[in-house]
Image (cartoon, rainbow, N blue to C red):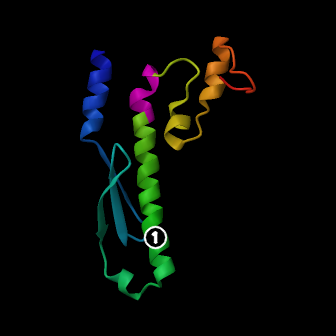
Amino acid sequence: MEEFGRASASLESATEEVMAKDRLVSAKVNAKGELIELKFHTQKYRQMAPKELSTAITDVIERARKQMAKRVVESYGSFAPEGVDLDEIISGRFNPSRMLSGFDIPFPTGTDKP
């Protein structure tokens, strides 16, 4: 529990920041993946097409979120039950039925899932 507490405490104030390759914009997210800061480092955005600017912004936000998700998985990975992939949980790909099927739980009538 102490290790879990330390992992939680270290992520409580953790942030990840990613800058665009052209240094136009950077995004900072917290451990929940929430955008907490968006900075424009040049005035180049004023001449960009809306679609191009939108792509640049969403790219840095998504990259920052992926970096933070990786950091969360690294911090909490050792606490996950055997067979549970935290990366799948964070990305929304986790299938709890697959995990529960290994517990020999009878399925409700008319279903193929616990």
Quarter of the picture containing the N terminus is top left
Main SS of residues in magenta: helix
- Name the residue carrying label 1: 56
Quarter of the picture containing the C terminus is top right
Label 1: element kind: helix
Q: 10 left or right of 86?
A: left
Image point 44% across, 21% down: which residue?
78
**Is residue 48 shown to the viewer in this render?**
yes
Q: Which residues are magenta?
A: 73-79
Q: 60 left or right of 83?
A: left
Q: Is residue 31 above or below residue 39?
A: above
Residue 58's spot in the image, x, y percent?
Answer: 46, 65
**Is residue 21 shown to the viewer in this render?**
no
Residue 76's spot in the image, x, y percent?
Answer: 41, 28
Image point 25% across, 31% down: which residue?
9
Residue 36's spot in the image, x, y percent?
Answer: 28, 56
Amino acid identity at mark 1: Ala
Q: Is residue 85 above or below residue 21?
A: above
- Which image quadrant is residue 113 in? top right
Q: 71 left or right of 108?
A: left
- Which image quadrant is residue 95 in? top right
